[in-house]
Image (cartoon, grey):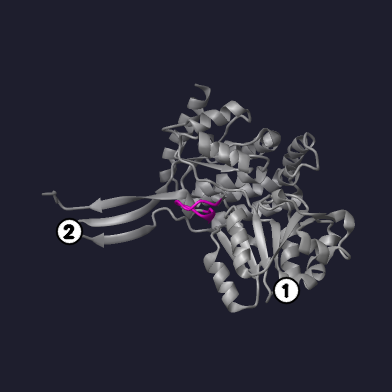
Amino acid sequence: MEYEDLFRNTQLASQALGILAPGLVNAVIREVAAETLAQKDFLLIENQKDLARMSPDDPKHDRLLLTEARLQSIALDLENVANLTSPLGEVLLQKELANGLQISKVRVPMGVVGIIYEARPNVTFDVFALCLKTGNACLLKGGSDAEFSNRAIVSVIHRVLEKHGLDPHLATLLPAKREATEALLQAIGYVDVLIPRGSQALIDYVRQSAKVPVIETGAGIVHTYFDASGDLEKGKKIIHNAKTRRVSVCNALDCLLVHEDRLADLTALLAPLAYYEVELYADLFAYAALGQSYPPQLLHLAQEEHFGTEFLSLKMAVKTVPSLSAALEHIARYSSKHSEAIIAEDTQALETFLNRVDAAAVYANASTAFTDGAQFGLGAEIGISTQKLHARGPMGLEELTSYKWVIKGDGQIRA
């Protein structure tokens, strides 16, 4: 009953959201942004308690880490969400039938959004802001790795909600223990949609175990293909950024595919990665091309398991391909359908890649690091969907809404 009461209270809180004025919603989000900066010392101290329990070598450590700069970025994202126009009430379709019935298709909230996530305290902020803006209450199930951080963040959110006379159950943080996850997966009648964010193992478990609707956010097994026509300088910058900007995120580069005609350029192409001590797992051709130039302690022969791996660290696979078609075949086999890129100057190669690759985000001559809700102008994101039903790619405000049909008549009856 402990969890059912929390679910019921959150559902009741969601039902009151429809009457909130947009100005109040925006004011609350902006005040959470301001309070986040005002309480940065408290938030960083609590975050350090979580960090102290995790090895710095753990790929999740960087995702767990909060810094003053990251809190400032979070606050800016919250401000961006407040500045966006709410999609609620948008009329998607409107028509009048021959019998005089006026039919409209109108955006409405989901209701209660549940999210299960691992060591990502920034998700707590993003989910709250996006859900409030779209008239949804949220059930937050963070991992034990971020327990102190999430509690601190939600305490800041609750302080602002209560100041404005709003129900703190609009953002309900569930206990970090596993039984709370099990309860959330079974919360039929209380949760309208459940979104998992984290490892592929977590996502698979939620998809297989949930009895409530799930929007799947997938792991990022990300490729970049350097075509025979690729520009070397563009390639160096793009590959460097995609791999090293932030290695622990799902849009980081995992596998470079290089056309065999450009193997002579591989040393120059990957020189910036050597500086950052990126370990490479290269196939025989790429290994031979790099053998005299790349630091030997960082260069390894690739095994089959290195292709299709999300490294989340300073590691990357390199695969030589004889053609664009071979690159497309490799991506089709190993991709998680998250983000894929091509570096090329040949117009036909670009168009073929963009049209053929099946992924949520497909890039031409740009870094996959841009797959992010804020970067796409969505303010923030609640996750990056790799499925095709309802939502795909970075999920912002529109993806947190459903719609209903509104029919207005003047006494019509059906024969």
Give the vertical position of 402 relative to 267 (above or below).
above
Q: Residue visible at 72% across and 70% down?
A: 260
Q: Is residue 149 visible?
A: yes
The disc label shown at residue 100, or none: 2
Stretch of the chain drawn in magenta: 385-396
Disc 2: CA contacts within 10 A as few (<14), some (14-19) or many (>=20): few
N-terminal-most mark, 1 or 2: 2
Instruction: Kindly indicate whether the residue at mark 2 contacts the one at mark 1 (C-beta within 8 angstroms).
Output: no
Image side of residue 210 versus residue 255, left or right:
left
Q: Quadrant of residue 118?
A: top right
> How far is the residue under mark 1 from the one under mark 2?
66 Å
Image side of residue 293 versus residue 346, left or right:
right
Disc 1: CA contacts within 10 A as few (<14), some (14-19) or many (>=20): some
- Nearest the viewer among 335 and 395 is 335
In reply to whether residue 190 is colored magenta, the answer given is no
Image side of residue 34 versus residue 42, left or right:
left
Q: Residue visible at 63% across and 28% down?
A: 177
Q: Residue visible at 75% across and 55% down?
A: 316
User: Could you tell me which secondary element the residue under label 2 belongs to?
Assistant: loop
User: Three-letter amino acid code at disc 1?
Assistant: Asp
Number of the front mark, 1 or 2: 1
The disc label shown at residue 318, or none: none
Image side of residue 16 versus residue 394, left or right:
left
- Nearest the viewer among 224 and 334 is 334
Q: Position of residue 251 (x, y in %)?
A: 65, 55
Q: Is residue 162 visible?
A: no
Residue occupied by mark 1: 261
User: Three-letter amino acid code at disc 2?
Assistant: Gly
Q: Position of residue 12 (x, y in %)?
A: 43, 34
Q: Quadrant of residue 267?
A: bottom right
- Nearest the viewer among 177 and 35 is 177
In reply to whether residue 388 is colored magenta, the answer given is yes
